[in-house]
Amino acid sequence: MSTAENIRPIKEGFVEPAKEEKVPRAAPPPHMEDPPDQQPSEVMRSEKWPVTVKLLHKSIPDNNGNMIDALEFRQPRGGDINRYGNPCRINQEGDVVIDERKMHYVMAALCGVLPPLLEAMDPRDWNSCAYRLRDFFLPDLRSWL
C-alpha cells in the first residue's frame, strides 16, 4: 500500500461515523426575571424630569457667566438623537459604549449649557452625567416581543 492510499482527506465539519461521539446537549438556561422591585425599566418609567446631577468636583460657568454646581437635564426626545446622534450603542460583547462627542452635545442640549462651557467640567462629573443619561438612549427589549 502506498502512502497516498493510506491518507484519506478529512472533510472539514464532518465526523467519521465510527468515531462519532455522543455529546450531551446542555440545557438552555432558565428564563430569569428581575425581582419586581429591581426592574430597570420600572425605574426609567417612574423617572421624574428634569434630572439633576450635582457637580461634586468642580463648578462650571453657565451661559450667563454664573458658576453652577449642578446640571438640570430635561427629558431626551427623538429629535435630540436626530440632531446629535445616538450617544450610546451596544457592542458585540453586549457592553454599552458611550460615544463621548455625541454625549457631550446631547448633554449640552438637554441642560441648556453651551458645549464649550461643558468642556470645563471635571472628568468625573462629566462621566457622572453621561452615565446618568445613558439608559435613556438604550432600547427597551420588551418591545421586541
Image (cartoon, rainbow, N blue to C red):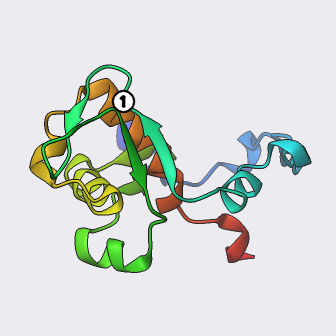
**Frontmost residue, 33 versus 15:** 33
Residue at disc 1, secondary structure: loop
Residue 136, given in percent of the width and then of the height, sits at: 52, 59
Quadrant of the frame with the N terminus: top left
Q: Nearer the viewer, residue 98 or 48?
A: 48
The picture quadrant where one finds residue 20 is: top right
Q: Residue furthest top?
A: 57
- Position of 84 relative to 128 (above/below): below
Q: Is residue 137 left or right of residue 58?
A: right
Residue 93 in sight: no
The residue that appears at 15% across and 50% down in the rendered structure is 64
Residue at 31% over, 19% down: 57
Type of the residue with mark 1: Leu
Residue 29 percent location from the top left of the image: 84, 45
Q: Considering depth in this image, is 110 or 9 the residue closer to the camera?
A: 110
- Please identify the residue farthest to the left as the structure is shown: 116
Q: Nearer the viewer, residue 130 or 2?
A: 130
Q: Quadrant of the C terminus?
A: bottom right
Asked whether the viewer can see residue 42, the reply is: yes
Quadrant in the picture for residue 76? bottom left
**For residue 119, side relative to residue 112 (left or right):** left
Q: Position of residue 5 (x, y in %)?
A: 43, 45
Which residue is depicted at the point 48% across and 45% down?
52
Please tell me how crowded label 1 is: few (under 14), some (14-19), or many (20+) other residues with Cα within 10 Å.
Answer: some
Left or right, 61 with respect to 46, comes to left
Q: Which residue is mark 1?
A: 55
Q: Position of residue 127 (x, y in %)?
A: 35, 34
Give the number of callouts. 1
The residue located at (38%, 22%) in the rendering is 56
- Compared to 55, does 35 lie above or below? below
